[in-house]
Image (cartoon, rainbow, N blue to C red):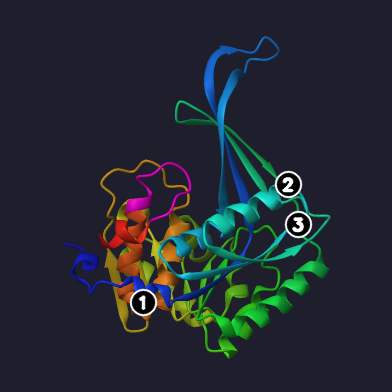
Amino acid sequence: MSLHDALPKVTREQLAASRVLVVGDVMLDRYWFGDVNRISPEAPVPVVHVTRSEERLGGAANVARNAAALGAQTSLLCVIGDDEPAYKLIELLTHSNVKAHVERDPGLATTIKLRIVSRQQQLIRIDFENTPTHEVLLAGLARFDALLPEHDVVLLSDYAKGGLTHVERMIEHARSAGKTILVDPKGDDWARYRGASVITPNRAELREVIGRWHSEADLEQRVSKLRAELDFAALLLTRSEEGMTLFMDHGVAHEPAQAREVYDVSGAGDTVIATLAAMLGAGVPLEHAMAHANRAAGVVVAKLGTATVEYHELFG
């Protein structure tokens, strides 16, 4: 039995009272599905006959969608372009019950990740992206300050696309307002996340920052040093098939992996931090929130592509 199964059930009413503000880099995930029956005469590459397409929320938009799917009141602050993918993003967010607060940059191409898939295999991914202007990012910071009083938990989802250029000031302002701050980090400069309540790296992301560890004791020592240096109240390490480990001042808690069948791990990190945020906003203690997040990850990896976990899947 996992800790999740032994926990008091979190009610729909508790989650409906959870107010989560997601801030970060959004993208539109486009999928073209088709069959490959021949090689191109122009070059030694497969010819894909596209038979259907799908569009899904990606990046911070998928994080927000995950929190909303559990029933939390979810807002998303982001920068997008003034183009067709931007309007599609807004439409998908509305359908996902996410309240979008967007800053538009006419010079920005809204980020698209186009995946071409045949027989469940991804053949190629094509990215369209650039970075937003300084002016629109400052406007986003002002909007962030205005939204803070309406939310309990701030979730910063960094995909290194420029949307969190002012992340230090956002954390400073959120801390001053007494908010819980969760960060899904990117890159090796974590000083910019100083003062966050919980940071949620995977193994590769943590190794970039603290180096390769040689034992659990070594890992605990390195994480403790990092947390002290950067004033993180807690660090939640997601470890794929090894589950996840939560490092706090009063000790370490571990949850083994829940997945019986792993179909697709893309977006699992989004589900983990979104579930954590929704639970903390509902008043669930951090260790219990981790157990629910671990269970949610086990559900979502059995689905294809970036997916969500509904309340009934988590609690029956």
| Mark 1 residue type | Gln
Magenta segment boundaries in residue numbering:
299-309
Name the side, left or right, on which 98 lies relative to 256: right
| Mark 2 residue type | Glu
Pointer 1 residue = 14
Residue 202 in view of the camera: no
The disc placed on residue 84 is: 2
Q: CA distance from mark 1 to mark 3?
A: 38 Å
Number of numbered markers: 3
For the residue carrying disc 3, how many other residues have a C-alpha within 10 Å: few (<14), some (14-19), or many (20+)? some
Name the side, left or right, on which 198 lies relative to 112: left
Q: CA distance from mark 3 to mark 2?
A: 17 Å
Give the percent coordinates (x, y) of residue 258. 27, 55
Nearer the camera: disc 3 or disc 2:
2
The disc placed on residue 131 is: 3
Name the side, left or right, on which 110 lies relative to 316: right
Give the percent coordinates (x, y) of residue 160. 65, 59
| Mark 3 residue type | Thr
Q: Residue at x 58, y 61 (%)?
A: 186
Contact, CB < 8 Å: mark 2 with mark 1?
A: no
The answer to which of 92 and 131 lies nearer the viewer is 92
Q: Is residue 308 magenta?
A: yes
The answer to which of 89 and 296 lies nearer the viewer is 89
Give the percent coordinates (x, y) of residue 109. 76, 50
Q: Could you tell which of marks 2 and 1 lies nearer the N-terminus?
A: 1
Give the percent coordinates (x, y) of residue 31. 57, 37
The answer to which of 177 and 188 lies nearer the viewer is 177
Q: Could you tell which of marks 1 and 3 lies nearer the N-terminus?
A: 1
